Image: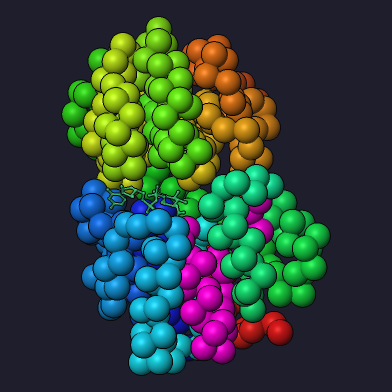
């Protein structure tokens, strides 16, 4: 079986790692296409190396742009790639512009399409990720859902016959890396670990960064917290904060560059709490057992809300109470699988398209 993976943004490289290993282990051919949506070394080359991934077979180098320009550039470049490789499956991951572009390219070339991390919904139609995941699910010949709730969403949209739960591949990586990090804690600089109680924060979603008023209110709320807040600065946040003259070093804030994946988990493990608008980090905090505050109105990972491990906060004025709460005592279940989602994904691909 020949599988062609389309990836381009940081979380997709994390998802690619266990899938790539599972495809190799079962003797399949795997072609990796990097769209170039993320190109900063910290979000791309360093991360690929850190995850033990080989260099992509094809690099499209599309870079940043408006949604239409970026999505269109990937789509235009994919025809030639798909024609060259003629894979048995095109595999797309998550909900970025690279995902929907890879999906459209496959469908238009009549190549079987599988969507990993299918069925997640925020039900917020203003989010670019929501458009991307809904369109990709409906284009796909096989929807690989991470959770039972995701499968329920797919069923509700009439996609049950081509959907299956495989578990969450990010959890595969997280559990494996967490075991390594617990055994050999990474030597993180003191700016990242803090010298006492501290929080770890990330902000990068368009809904947070692209409205200057919202951005300055959220940053001011973080800056006003009574504990140091280590802020991992994504390039999008840096660019938007500069444009809006928002100071990312104000008050309690301690801005630092994004971390490698293992270092990030090490930092989550040491922090007293996480504040984020990222989907992946909410889940990682849950798996690690660090309380999380999500600066959004909804989450695609509602399982994390159980027992108070993750709390949604829309109003910046409510951030302090949530971010400084103690560690919940409620037990956490295993809604994201037990670390074998990548193997289950490959087994489902071996069974062929369901349509
Ligand atoms: C993208 C995904 C989002 C995902 C996130 C993970 C979409 C619509 N969004 O958001 O779902 O959670 O990746 O990080 O696909 N930039 C750089 N260097 C880079 C990449 C981006 O400086 O390597 C800056 C540019 O100013 C760019 C901005 O970040 O315009 C936004 O980048 P983009 O790839 O469009 O979206 P992300 O915010 O990274």
- Residue 330: say if magenta: no
**Residue pictured at 57% horizontal, 15% vertical:** 318
Residue 291 point in image, percent of width and height:
52, 26
Residue 182 point in image, percent of width and height:
35, 37
Name the foreground residue: 217 vs 20.
217
Is residue 17 visible in the rendered image? The answer is no
Q: Which of the 4 image quadrants contains residue 311?
A: top right
Please tell me whether residue 51 is drawn above or below residue 205 in the rendered image.
below
Image quarter in which the C terminus is found: bottom right
Magenta span of residues: 96-121
Q: Is residue 15 left or right of residue 48?
A: right
**Residue pictured at 43% horizontal, 70% vertical:** 72
Please tell me whether residue 38 is drawn above or below residue 56 in the rendered image.
above
Residue 23 point in image, percent of width and height:
43, 76
Name the foreground residue: 29 vs 237.
237
Name the foreground residue: 260 vs 321.
321
Q: Is residue 260 left or right of residue 198?
A: left
Is residue 75 visible in the rendered image? The answer is yes
Please tell me whether residue 314 is drawn above or below residue 125 in the rendered image.
above
**Residue pictured at 37% horizontal, 48% vertical:** 177
* Total numbered labels: 0
Q: Is residue 247 left or right of residue 269?
A: left
Name the foreground residue: 72 vs 190.
72
Q: Which of the 4 image quadrants contains residue 69?
A: bottom left
**Residue pictured at 44% horizontal, 16% vertical:** 221
Q: Is residue 15 left or right of residue 297?
A: left
Residue at the limit of the structure toward the top, as seen here: 226
Residue 90 point in image, percent of width and height:
49, 79
- Residue 113: say if magenta: yes
């Amino acid at each position: 079986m020949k599988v062609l993976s389309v990836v381009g943004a940081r979380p997709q490289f994390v998802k690619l790692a266990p899938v790539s290993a599972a495809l190799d282990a079962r003797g399949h051919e795997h072609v990796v296409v990097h769209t170039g949506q993320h190109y900063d070394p910290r979000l791309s080359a360093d991360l690929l190396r850190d995850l033990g991934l080989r260099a992509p077979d094809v690099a499209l180098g599309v870079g940043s742009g408006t949604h239409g320009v970026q999505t269109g550039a990937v789509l235009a470049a994919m025809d030639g790639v798909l024609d060259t490789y003629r894979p048995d499956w095109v595999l797309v991951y998550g909900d970025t512009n690279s995902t929907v572009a890879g999906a459209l390219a496959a469908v238009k070339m009549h190549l079987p399409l599988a969507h990993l991390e299918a069925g997640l919904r925020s039900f917020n139609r203003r989010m670019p990720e929501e458009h991307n995941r809904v369109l990709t699910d409906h284009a796909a010949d096989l929807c690989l859902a991470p959770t039972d709730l995701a499968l329920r969403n797919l069923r509700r949209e009439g996609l049950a016959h081509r959907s299956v739960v495989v578990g969450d591949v990010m959890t595969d990586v997280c559990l494996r890396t967490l075991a390594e990090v617990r055994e050999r804690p990474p030597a993180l600089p003191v700016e990242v670990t803090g010298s006492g109680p501290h929080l770890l924060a990330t902000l990068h979603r368009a809904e947070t960064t692209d409205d200057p008023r919202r951005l300055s209110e959220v940053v001011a709320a973080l800056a006003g917290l009574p504990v140091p807040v280590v802020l991992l600065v994504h390039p999008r946040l840096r660019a938007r904060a500069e444009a809006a003259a928002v100071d990312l070093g104000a008050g309690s804030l301690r801005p630092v560059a994004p971390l490698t994946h293992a270092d990030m988990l090490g930092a989550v493990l040491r922090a007293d709490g996480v504040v984020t608008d990222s989907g992946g980090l909410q889940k990682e905090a849950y798996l690690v057992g660090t309380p999380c505050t999500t600066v959004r109105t909804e989450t695609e990972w509602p399982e994390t809300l159980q027992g108070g491990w993750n709390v949604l906060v829309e109003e910046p004025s409510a951030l302090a109470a949530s971010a400084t709460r103690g560690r919940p005592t409620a037990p956490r279940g295993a809604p994201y699988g037990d670390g074998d989602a990548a193997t289950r994904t490959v087994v489902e691909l071996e069974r062929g398209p369901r349509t």
